[in-house]
Amino acid sequence: MQSRASREPVTEAHDDSAEEDVLAAVDLPAAGASPRRAPSLETGVVRGTASGLLVELGGGPVLARRAKSCLTAPDAGDRVLCATDGDQVFVLAVLEGEAGATTRIAVEGDLKVQATGRLGLGAGDQIEIAAAKEVGLFAGKLQVRAQAAVAAIEEMGLVGRSLDVHLQKAVVVAERLEARADRLVQRAKQAFRFIEALEQVRAGVIDVRAEGLAAVRGENTIVAARTLAKLDGEQVKIG
């Protein structure tokens, strides 16, 4: 037969100080203050872009900022994915827009696209590069291939060490053309020059040689020499 003392439950000692330490370590909100709302994701529709992004969410229209990772600029009517963090709303991505509308990649400040390997840029129709000030191309080797090329340039400066051009046909139309060189060599099977008004050649020495006929014809022909004028040939005919 068990004694009365053995039938009573044993009561363990309770350490109140340990429980107080655990409660003190928990960051509980102050009494009367609302807990911070956890960040959430929500889809919405852009209603305006004139003075910031006005996005229609489930709770109504809010002003939002485009996240730095969202390179696509939203347009009115686009469906976007938004992240809400406290009082801030960020547009993370543009999910869909009007069919056939232009997609614009826009950033604030400078933008640099860099790849450790090859970088390709292609389009099915047309590629346009526009800058308000300057467009620079820097490369160890530059290749340009096109079936047709048109360039409209008001002023052009070309500085180089060597130029090699192979053309089937070249046409140059200019009001004024100047060429300066220490040495100029031209080779052609046939050369024709048509000058309507005046042609002047000023040189230290002029040497004209012809294997066949050398003819000088004019309405008036003048040959003048300050010291010596010489005609030499097996036959000399005047008149």
Image (spheres, rainbow, N blue to C red):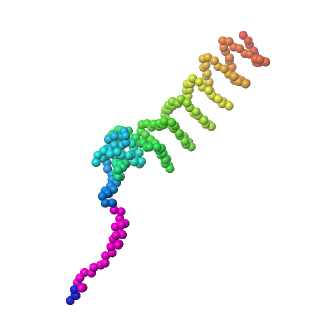
Check the image and name the residue furthest to the right.
227
Rendered location of residue 217, percent (x, y): 67, 15
Rendered location of residue 39, percent (x, y): 34, 54
Residue 14 painted magenta = yes
- Name the residue at 62% across, 24% down: 191
34 or 138: nearer the eye? 34
Rendered location of residue 206, percent (x, y): 71, 23
Q: Evaluate whether residue 24 shows in this view.
A: yes
Check the image and name the residue furthest to the left.
1
Magenta stretch: give its range. Answer: 5-29
- Say above or below: 158 vs 227: below
Q: Evaluate whether residue 96 shows in this view.
A: no
23 or 171: nearer the eye? 23
Which image quarter: residue 71? Answer: top left
- Name the residue at 68% across, 12% down: 220
- Name the residue at 33% across, 62% down: 28
User: Image check: 128 left or right of 53?
Assistant: right
91 or 61: nearer the eye? 61
Check the image and name the residue furthest to the front.
32
Rendered location of residue 233, percent (x, y): 76, 18
User: Image check: 144 left or right of 8?
Assistant: right
Q: Quadrant of the N terminus?
A: bottom left
Q: Quadrant of the C terminus?
A: top right
